[in-house]
Amino acid sequence: MVTILTNADIYTMDERNPRAKTIVYDGAKILYVGSNEAEWKPMAGEKARIYNLGGKMVIPGFVDSHCHPGHIAKTVWHVRLPYTEDVTELLGFMKEYAEKHPASEKPFLFFEYYPTHIFDEKGPRKEMLDEIIADRPVLVQDYGEHMSWVNSKTLELMGVTRDTPDPEPGYRMFVRDSDGTPTGFVLEFAWKCFEETLYENLQWRPPDEITEDALKMVLDQYMEYGVTAIFDAFVETERQLISMKTLDEKGDSMLYYDGAVLCDSLDLLDEKIAELGRFRETFGNDHMKFNTMKLFLDGTNESGSGGYLHPIINDDSGENYGNTTLNDADLFQYMKKVNEAGLDLHVHVVGDRSFRMLCDAYEKLMDEVGRDNLKTQLVIAHCELVDPADMYRPAELGITINYTLRWSGGNYGEKAKLYLGEERWNRFYTFSPMIKSGALIAFSSDLIAYSKMRLSNPFVGMQISHTRVDMDTPLDPRRFPESVRPPVSEKFDRALMLKGYTINSAKQMRWDHIMGSLEAGKLANINVLSENYFDVPADKIGQIKCAATIFEGKVVRGSLDD
């Protein structure tokens, strides 16, 4: 049936027709976008549904181009900590929770999150947790989501001792005392390598299977926020895809899904490329596709495990340049294999040396095979620290930049200063030179915990990036005027953010021919907003709601009747 939304303020994201008053769609496809009544009236017919939106703002459905729905679904059993920078208060909350929930009820306590910056580079110690909870394993996740704090019972049940080799020394590792004894501070998910041993010894497993019910809780939130397509930055398990396809076939997912396969090893790459092909064959359909390899090239700046052009400042050797998972030669071979397979590549990068390595490898590949024969689209995610000399290269090489808007307010605090110093920290999240030079930038939520699901709302990320002030954990206003994270010049304008969360993200995912803008022939994935995004005060952007979310012509959230 033909549906007409008229008397609307439509931001189409179509450069040839940027504003309109009326949109007409029939089923899943848009027929018309414009403002001429004489053009759309003949499309109405006798049975058309016509809605007068009273001037409400209309935009394309959001496209979240880097998220982790499977990982979020696995965390619904975690315990959320109150936000505080007072360690005593954190410990008090955990102790009280453990007393209310004995080990017979909660055999493993997983708390999230503690502010990363409240401890120095040595991190928190296991003894602090041992004093309050010693009868069962405890793990406390940091805000940056790459570091953890565990008690002695956790180390014991994992079988981790002074003699246990680190999974990846200098990167995925247990911080240790001078005699090799683990301190309880864990970097880059090293504990996950011993997770099964922990559960076997505990004779218990968390309820973390990615069932349809658990995944639907996550997907429902995306839909509530007007997200109609997502890029899963790496598939957690095949069980996740079974659940995803089941929900899609039942009509319970109401979004498009693009899944990547993770591989950080050149030796395993052939195997993982084959796995991606199997996923495509088994689970691919009109709403689900698989065409991307995911690589973590470095770690986090909060742990000093990025790849840097200059040494970290708290190592007296002057020779510590952080970490990369691949060297230059292996990175090129990795990229070459991905290109030969006709796949795209999505890479986690936080350090300036890692960023340059990727640009160099991509340019070398382009020179070797020729730009016209280049099959791989390279996406560099995060790009927290980029050398000024490399800012022009994404535009020159056709590299897409993916950035998480909610980080702009300094959510992770100042822990990275311990490793990189003030000057480099102040250059974090600088993208204007890239954008001005013509680089494509897409925006995303990159969330991994259900307790923080509200941060998946694109409008929350937009508010934080537009103001450079974190809504939950603002920087100290005594040192940062009005809690604004430097550089102030990097406040994103509203039009750019809307473009980055719609058409640019669709381009990253190679879906721009069917979504990302409102134009004839594309999908009727549409958001009707409660307020005009361009008119609300800056500190109220995060409060905007989707009065109606339309997926393939069906209202899946909210209503048009009002």
Image: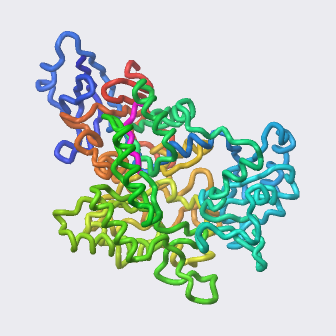
Q: Is residue 320 above or below residue 510?
A: below
Tell how many labels: 0
Q: Quadrant of the N terminus?
A: top left
Residue 123 magenta-drawn? no
Q: Is residue 42 above or below residue 526?
A: above
Q: Residue at x 59, y 42 (%)?
A: 74
Q: Residue at x 22, y 30 (%)?
A: 30
Q: Splitting the image into 4 quarters, where does residue 312 fall?
A: bottom right
Magenta stretch bounds: 253-260
Q: Splitting the image into 4 quarters, where does residue 102 fall?
A: top right
Q: Residue at x 39, y 40 (%)?
A: 257
Asked which colour scheme the image uses, the reply is rainbow
Residue 259 magenta-drawn? yes
Q: Is residue 14 above or below residue 24?
A: below
Residue 288 picture location, percent across and down? 36, 38
In the visual, does 415 lie left or right of 527? right
Residue 359 picture location, percent across and down? 33, 72
Residue 99 picture location, percent across and down? 87, 43
Q: Is most of the magenta stretch helix, strand or loop?
A: strand
- In the orientation shown, which residue stands out farthest toward the bottom? 317
- In the orientation shown, which residue stands out farthest toward the top? 46
- Report whether residue 262 is seen: yes
